Amino acid sequence: MIRFGLRLTLSGGREAVARLMVIAAAVALGVGLLLVTLAGINAVNAQNARYAWLNSGNPTATSAGVKPSPDPLWGALGIDLYQGKEITRVDVAATGPQSPVPPGIAHLPGPGQYYASPALSTLLRSAPATELGDRYPGSQIGTIGQAALPSPDSLIIIVGHTADQLSHVPGAAQVTSIANKTPSSCSGCQHGTNAAGMDLILSVTSAALLFPVLIFIGTATRLAAARREQRFAAMRLVGATPRQVSVISAVESSVAAVVGTAAGFGLFFLLRVPLAGVPFTREPFYPSDLTLGLLDILLVAVGVPVAAAGAARLALRRVRISPLGVSRRVTPRPPRAYRVVPLAVGIGELAYFVGRRPPTTNGQVLAYLPGIFLMMGGLVIAGPWLTMVGARIMARRTNRPATLIAARRLSDDPKAGFRAVSGLVLALFVTSTAVGVITTLVDNQGIPSGISHSAAAESTVADEFWPVQTGSGPRASVATSAPATVTSKLASIQGVQAVLVTHANPSAFGNSQRNDTVSPGLVSCAELSRAPSLGRCEAGVQVASVDPGFVYFGGGGKPHGSPVWPAASVSGEQLQSLPLLSIVVATNGSTSAIEQAKTVLEVAYPYQRYPISTMAEFFSSTSKVLTGYQQLANVVILVSLAVAGCSLAVSVAGGVSERKRPFSLLRLTGVPLGMLRRMVAMESAVPLLLVAVVASGSGFLAAGLFLRSQENYSLRAPGTEYYVIVALGLAVSLGIIASTLPLLKRITGPETARNE
């Protein structure tokens, strides 16, 4: 029977070949997406492991049993910024010959030496020394290897010092062993990504992509289902056993699944290199990170064909029950209202965790994924019932023949009507959920309104030295003064318009019962007058009191413009003796002026806790994460809509082809071709538009419940882009439906009714 099944599959004419190709293409797409997800999870973990050494000094970051070195290593970790790119700076100093050595380098650099990553080495050669290279005096003695680089684009530098130099640096610590635990498995590790959180995102993403693909596979498998059922029923009538029919049907589906699985593996390896460059963890991967384990390969290579065979067996269960069941067709039982229960359970499950967010990432995975999956599955289960309800309402309210016939057909078999649009319904759910989450995150975590486009945010550099607050007054900050040599160097840079030095306000830091309206910063009005975009003083005032971060929020950041800062009860002479709070450099916005100013400040005040930056760069980290999530959401939306469109086209075309005899008989009885076309269009458009409203609403509800539970955010209304995407998606879907209507004229001639 296997040989006979292969013969039917491969020699069944153009219809069988077309069905085989469509099923194989659907399986290839599903397998490719599944492999990308599995490889993506492996890549996140591999990349995260290479962050481990940057957490050296954290006692929880080193595995038990690692022998500490008798010669500790002095180390300090910092971040520099160059044109918005983060440069990880690792300062090291050996205390003896056995000091631990970070991965990726042969030995520790000595004083005046450094190692740089390949990407940073290229940047150091191309950038002017005054903008970047002067921050790292000395000579490069080598390149950091891949073992220490999370990404091929990582900008990392390891700078050598003497132990005496580095031991006096604020934040420096002694390291007796290099950390080897991934950031996800140690407590307090600050460098690296939350791999478990990324696994959650990838799991949801893969489900969002695979659900429409699985529906596409099911739709493609049902191509010419009526003809195949008749053929298998005829075999039963001439003596074939149910087992033999099942074997033949399984062979048909398995051949397509095997071909599609092989094509899916080819698709994955073809796209592996470009996919490695997608920075959804903020940094791209090495192509070697996107690997598949033996278990992953076996799971997909064996599981997909087996699942396809099982689906075929399930689809033809009516033939196994009765060989006459195909000929004696009856109206199926209408779906019941209990079909909405899974959707309601999914909503309830997500609502339960509002105010009860699990503390761990694994707990959050177990909390949110079931609810989202239940809602996605619930939409598919409830779809036929919703279609039936809408069809019955339409039948009662119409008096047009085409609409009435379409409504009656949908009411009689709502499962078939909804099946054609089920993929698109899930795509709309995914789109609404993704847009709702991303829009809300951007609104709450993105760059504040008015700042992202302000001149001060883009062109003003700030180096902040915040003192530690105590009950009696401020302690000494990282810097206690701004030497004239530093301010003169800054002022001599072409493009620098003003240099402002702010000092700590004793009234703000020294008084435990201070008035909150007292600002902690003091600035010379003479200096402030050179940077009018940052505010101005009252007439005749020498020193003004400013808010913290006034460079960003007090200047161009506020919609009402530059403020007038209140006078401070401090003289110009007293101002110079107060602890330094920040050095602010107003530039013309040129890259050269901004980066040269950073270099001067970096050389004068190295080893600071926070990098020297502009406001735009200050928010760049969050913006990059949100941008990565937005890109991932766009991929999910576009792929889901594309797959759903293919599923819709296949389903509508297949349905028209299978009903060519009834349509031919209707034409012979005098029904105009235009009426048939309107009827077919209504059968697909009504469930699409009806359930699309439910799907979009469910997507926003899922997004709102997730955001309220996970971030305690209220859902924000989406922007115009969402409505444009939905309108285009629906328009394209209706266009796909319309493109299948010309088939009616070709397949409903008198010869069809005669030959069938």
Image (spheres, helix red, strand yellow):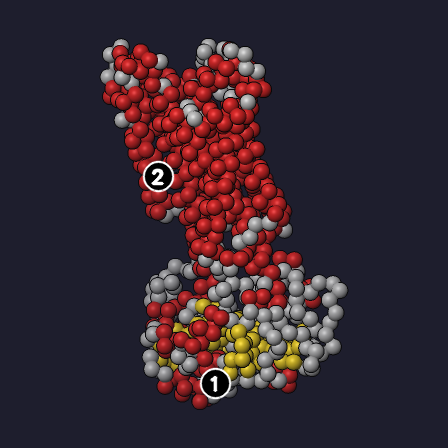
Q: Is residue 502 visible?
A: no
Q: Amino acid at mark 2?
A: Gly
Nearer to us: label 2 or label 1: 2
Q: Amino acid at mark 1?
A: Ala
Location of residue 103 in the rendering, given as x and y in whole percent from the top left corner: 61, 69
Which secondary structure, mark 1?
loop
Q: Is residue 145 above or below residue 635?
A: below
Assign the C terminus to one quadrant of the image: top left
Q: Which residue is mark 2?
A: 729
The residue located at (34%, 73%) in the rendering is: 589
Distance from the alpha carbon under mark 2 to that under mark 1: 59 Å
Left or right of 288: which side holds 22?
A: left
Marks 2 and 1, the one that precedes in the sequence: 1
* 210 vs 478, nearest the viewer: 210
Which secondary structure, mark 2?
helix
Q: Is residue 406 above or below residue 50?
A: above
* 156 vs 747, nearest the viewer: 747
Left or right of 164: which side holds 375?
A: left
Q: Which residue is mark 1?
A: 482
Q: Is residue 572 above or below residue 397?
A: below
